[in-house]
Image (cartoon, coloured by chain):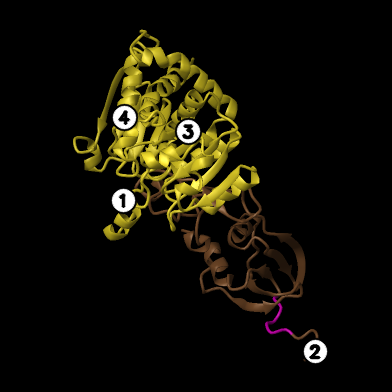
Chain colours: A yellow, B brown
Amino acid sequence: MRHVISVQDFSAEEIIDLLDRAETMVAIARGEAVSDLLRGKVLACIFYEPSTRTRLSFETAMHRLGGGVIGFAGTEATSVVKGETLADTIRMVSAYADAVVLRHPREGAARLASQFSDVPVLNAGDGAGQHPTQTMLDLFTIRSEMGRLEGLNISLVGDLRYGRTVHSLAIALAKFGNRINLVSPEGLEMPGEVVAYLKDAGKFGKACHTPEEVITDTDVLYVTRIQKERFPDPVEYEKMAGVYRVDPELVSRGPDNMIIMHPLPRVNEITPEVDALPQAKYFVQAFNAVPVRMALLSRVIGGE
Amino acid sequence: MPDNYMKVQRIEHGTVIDHILPGMAFDVLRVLGMSNDRSMSILINSHSKKGGKKDILKIENVELSVQEASRVALISPQATINIIVEGKVVRKFNAEAPKVVRGILTCSNPNCISNQKEPVTTEFRLGSDDGHHYVCSYCERDIIDLAKRVRW
């Protein structure tokens, strides 16, 4: 039984294999072809925290493969409010379903769930912890848009300190042979251990505080949201939140074939005028969640 | 002052834990669960022949096991254990930091699932790099202020 808890649990070969498989799923994900690969199978999506893209794309992925979905989004109508432990909830849900997708506010929740589940657990985000399927769909998007997954200059912009998803992404991108620039406001820099990893791997580009410093040498501009929940003081948040604005003027300074990605939701870090530019790929990225999660589900449930 | 001058008398039977990181002697007692009803001597910031300072613990009438010694190594990996019988060192070994620690420590990340009311035993793995640090198997974070994270 294969759980999907952390991207570090996957080798580069396994990731490439998964991306190849996701490519074969694109037509089904678009509704242009029909599949009943997971017919008769049930996926449980249990979300203890808000989510739009992750939950809907997992549900879409399961439906597109002919399977059914159960679950909850928010714990108000469940026994969780009566004090049921995650361990008990998982034991019960894993008896109803063939795989469990879990989002939870506590770090390590998916790892714990995997110990109590009789079926594969897929981590859909555990607090400020891991979100491996996001990394996989980011890699898929880069490969499909740039035609390769190595030898690129990738600039990560925004809150690089707290979002561990961006830490995993930086490490995964470096493993595939890309050079990483780090752009963050003062105080939200990438943690030292990730920077050290990039330097040791010879894949560290530049660390700076403004995207202007790296834009001319960027193939992929990966923008992240400054997370409001990280700031106890709303004034401090407002100061940080307005630091970066990716607008058409900034984009025009980058190479023509540069792409812009964002895991979404965005707040004001990318202006709406950028959406119409050919460089804007964040909604393509959001769609790519479906074929990538289809590939994962077919593997963990269907044994493909 | 003669060369063999000793601030604290030698013990006849028991355990001497030497080369404890300076200032960590009380934490070592804590991780060993030693209560203050035992007869013992504690030297803090003693001069080390290897240079620098160290703490020393002399605990009478207790022979530390290898398993107990590994608890010492959790917070003071350079410590050496000397078992004393009839005034002589009969066994000397280095405390070896355990690769995996289950149940003894609590995670320093308050948002870690292992700190919630879940039926799980905490688990930490010794970091793979040279530094002496432990990583939580659940939230994958380094444990901070390790000596304070020991529970009974």
Same chain for the residues under marks 3 and 2 in the image: no
Q: Secondary structure at mark 2?
A: loop
| Marked residue chain, label 3 | A
For the residues labelled 3 and 2, the Cα–Cα distance comes to: 77 Å
Q: Earlier in the sequence, mark 4 or mark 1?
A: 4
Same chain for the residues under marks 2 and 4 in the image: no
* Labelled disc at residue B2: 2
Q: In the rendered image, which quarter is residue B79 located in?
A: bottom right
| Marked residue chain, label 1 | A
Camera-nearest residue between B148 and A154? A154
B89 vs A248, left or right, is right
Q: Amino acid under label 2?
A: Pro
Residue beneath the point at 45% across and 27% down? A141
Camera-nearest residue between B124 and B7? B124
Select label 2 or label 4 by which is in front. 4
Same chain for the residues under marks 4 and 3 in the image: yes
Residue, disc 1: A229
For the residues labelled 4 and 1, the Cα–Cα distance comes to: 21 Å
Q: Work out whether A128 lies above or below A262.
A: below
Residue, disc 4: A55
Select label 1 or label 2 by which is in front. 1
